[in-house]
Amino acid sequence: MNKQGNTYTFLYAAILVVVVAAVLSFVALSLKPMQTKNIKIEKMQNILASVKINDVEANEAEKIYNKLITKTFVVNVKGEVVEGVNAFDVDLSKEVKKKVDKRNLPVFIYTKDGVNKYIIPVRGKGLWGPIWGFISLNDDKNTVYGAIFDHQGETPGLGAEIANEAFQKPFSGKQIHNESGKFVSIEVHKAGKGTDIHSVDGISGGTMTSKGVDAMLKDCLSSYEAFLKK
């Protein structure tokens, strides 16, 4: 075959593309179990962080999670337990796209000194992509014990601040129901305006991400209202 001809060039390029694609596919499949495990470990670390168990090493996360998270289950919007669904395996990115009455709602329970903390996952939209987190409630199922949030691509120094303790810490002690027992969520106000028991300050310069957190909390926490009032 004439190595200077077009036929040779096209054939060579086609073979090269096939070989490279095969190698990439093999590498991707080889790494998938490790990636899946890392995602699982990170989720466990985040659940633990929502009840103020921080700095858990990756190699210890599963052991500590299994010891401290004493119960997990899934409920529906009526607050009824859904049988046959693993709470940890529920993909919230898919659930939030469903109508509320079709959602599987995971609950994780952390028990300390005989007292339960109820951990609820939340997920929504920030300015540039998805945002998510976990909110833990005291045994009254009303007062926030702890909160942790993360994001995919919010602006560093602005919206990305939701992943920092300075934004997350003020959620502790806030309440999601008013004195009459009505669900009001936790509002994320303009910086400097979150002064009452049902609100926190948003991020200065991160207005859209703050609004995203506000909407995320209203949407996700309200889905659990029947369960929380039982």
Image (tube, rainbow, N blue to C red):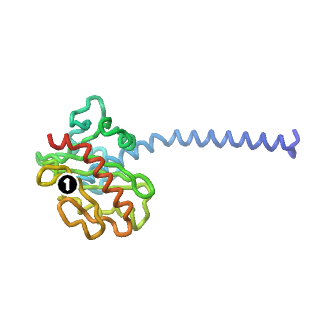
Q: Residue at x 26, y 58 (%)?
A: 187
Could you say which quadrant of the image residue 213 lies in? bottom left
Residue 135 place in picture, x, y as percent: 25, 51
Image quadrant containing the N terminus:
top right
- State left or right for residue 69 relative to residue 14: left
Query: Which is nearer the eye, 59 or 125?
Result: 125
Total marks shown come to: 1
- State left or right for residue 15 relative to residue 144: right
Query: Which is nearer the eye, 160 or 2?
Result: 160
SS label for mark 1 = strand
Query: Which is nearer the eye, 176 or 12?
Result: 176
Residue 186 place in picture, x, y as percent: 24, 56
Image quadrant containing the C terminus:
top left
Q: Residue at x 21, y 39 (%)?
A: 71
Residue 43 place in picture, x, y as percent: 34, 47
Q: Mark 1, residues whose alpha carbon is within 10 Å: few (<14), some, or many (≥20)? A: many
Query: Residue pushed farthest top?
Result: 84
Q: Residue at x 28, y 40 (%)?
A: 106
Q: Which residue is mark 1?
A: 144
- State left or right for residue 7 relative to residue 158: right
Observer able to see residue 187: yes
Residue type, numbered disc 1: Val
Query: Which is nearer the eye, 159 or 102?
Result: 102
Observer able to see residue 64: no
Could you say which quadrant of the image residue 90 lies in? top left
Residue 61 place in picture, x, y as percent: 31, 48
Could you say which quadrant of the image residue 24 lies in? top right
